[in-house]
Amino acid sequence: MKESKTYRYMPILMAVSAILGIIVGTFFTSHYSGNRLNIINSGSNRLTNMLHFINDQYVDEVNIDSLVDIAIPQILAELDPHSAFLNSKEVQLANDDLKSSFSGVGIEFNIREDTLHVQNVISNGPAERAGIIAGDKIVQVNGEKFVGKAVTNEEAMRRLKGPKDTKVVLGIERYGHAKPLTFTVTRGEIPQKSIGATYMLDENTGYIHIKSFAEQTWSEMLVALASLSQQGFDNLVIDLRDNSGGYLQAAVQIANEFLPKKKLIVYTEGRKSPRQEYTSNGHGSYQRIPLVVLINEASASAAEIFAGAMQDNDRATIVGRRSFGKGLVQQPITFSDGSMLRLTVARYYTPSGRCIQKPYAQGDEKEYAKDLLDRYERGEFFSQDSIKHTGPAYHTAMGRTVYGGGGITPDIFVPEDTVNMSPYYRSAAMSGLIYQFAFSYTDNNRQKLNAYQDLEALNRYLVGQHTVDRFADYADGHGLKRRNLQIQKSHTLLEHFINSRIIYNILGEQALSKYLTHFDPVVKRALEILRQGKAFPQKEESQPDTSGKKVARAADATVPFRTNTSLCRA
């Protein structure tokens, strides 16, 4: 038993020694916000000495850099679920995701059957100017074949992205052409939008879908609000579902637009990090507009900061399902080779004092990773009574009860609807066959589909094409056996899912969002609340419900794969 424990902790000891060796070695080169790391290497530091002994005396040659790359994640895993080490490539990709633009060719792509398929071409981007169109297959990059197992998202982005004004030669297979075509694309700046859709849900209600909180989100939000103002909106729905977060500052800036002066938005605090508060300045232009915020189990971090600020200040009604519960603050420490340590130094707290972070056991990443599955299995997606709050009760500015212990629990709970679900539908959705069929159908009928540039007209056309029957035949030939009774039960769900993907392929993200909100029970519930005058700030004749426990029934249809495009950009 004693010997077993020794072996169990050997990787940790190695990891500790490795990370300390890195920190000591970068004593004069590592910076955070312009300040040097003050690390003291004591002569009695046995762990650092151990690393030196391995390097000097181990029986075989040792690659210390490789050992460090393996060891650092192991030691960080013993701290918390969000402290992490990123190599230089991972740092670049992470930063690109939150920038307003990146340098590339300007396409959205997916990988199917070991081949890179161009799903969409960015309007007026380098690829469009070079003549590449949606439906093309990229089979060569700079004269080298790019098919088979080598084709991954990471490798595709590595080959297609590059410095502005550099050239890349692409070999293209195109429908109707017997031989590959060659195009030379000059890379350029490709804008990235963090707001996926802005439009009117009805004559009074505006809708904004925020995909992430990136460096340009606030300015995009101001443009979106100005657009809705021109259309005469009196109410607003902000959709944060599937928003995994981003920059704290972006969430604070947007919250400021909706809050009166001197309202606490969020604060951070840690063992070595003094309490830091973020408050509103009173300059926001939309302090009194009735507001509903939509969240779900994939809303995290900055999305939870915004939702928590709106809820605790009684500024918005929160609708949906309990959010993810990511409330740990990471300090980035950049090393000289471009790699980065993200070390948790504090926690986020909502204005009422709730810690956003859900509970976790140190060193148990697997248990933490399956939290959402556990929620599903215990029924939390279907019943508010199944939500387990591990923290105490808190109170909003108006005295409403809210709970800590992980994530933001909505004021109005809307369950996942299972009325029309069937094993066939679940298999079709989870297998990826719907995405594959939609792409193949679009590719084979692109000329006809391109004639419909209006959402309603395209939808009417697709309804007449019996896409569910076509899909069932396609799926049967790809390993999913046809089940007519189950298909009949889930026909509406299948049709919505299939047609939504075809609509996205032809008309883009905003059209996809508009189509899906017609059937979305969470959006329907938000509209009911606004029409009844029950959203915060409430009308004088309405009295706030302070029960803190409201349950709403979902509509008959649900759309489980809302606006996630599952695409990569390059």
Image: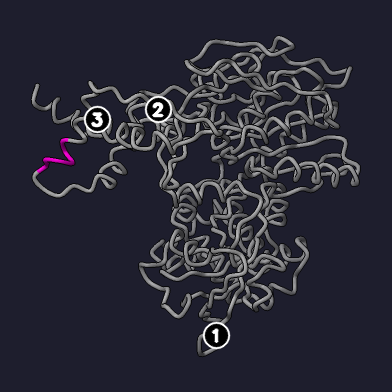
Instruction: Mark 1: give few (<14), some (14-19) or many (20+) Cα within 10 Å.
Output: some
Callout 2: SS: loop
Residue closer to the observer: 518 or 536: 536
Q: Is residue 111 visible?
A: yes
Is mark 1 in CB contact (under 8 Å) with mark 2? no
Q: Is residue 147 left or right of residue 213?
A: left
> Could you tell me which residue is drawn at 34 percent across and 32 percent down?
24
Instruction: Mark 2: give few (<14), some (14-19) or many (20+) Cα within 10 Å.
Output: some
- Chain part drawn in magenta: 53-58
Quarter of the image where the C terminus is located = bottom right
**Quadrant of the rendered image containing residue 145:** bottom left
Comes first in the chain, label 3 or label 2 = 3
Which circle, 1 or 3, is nearer the viewer? 3
Callout 3: SS: helix
Distance from the alpha carbon under mark 1 to that under mark 2? 50 Å
* Picture disc at residue 48: 3
Q: Which residue is mark 2?
A: 80
Q: Which residue is mark 1?
A: 181
- Looking at the picture, how far across and down is residue 446, in whole percent? 64, 75
The residue lying furthest to the bottom in this view is 178
Comes first in the chain, label 1 or label 2 = 2
Distance from the alpha carbon under mark 1 to that under mark 3? 57 Å
Is mark 3 in CB contact (under 8 Å) with mark 2? no
* Above-or-below relation of 21 to 288: below
* Above-or-below relation of 35 to 450: above
Q: Is residue 186 left or right of residue 222?
A: left
Say which amino acid is labelled 3. Thr
Say which amino acid is labelled 2. Asp
Comes first in the chain, label 1 or label 3 = 3
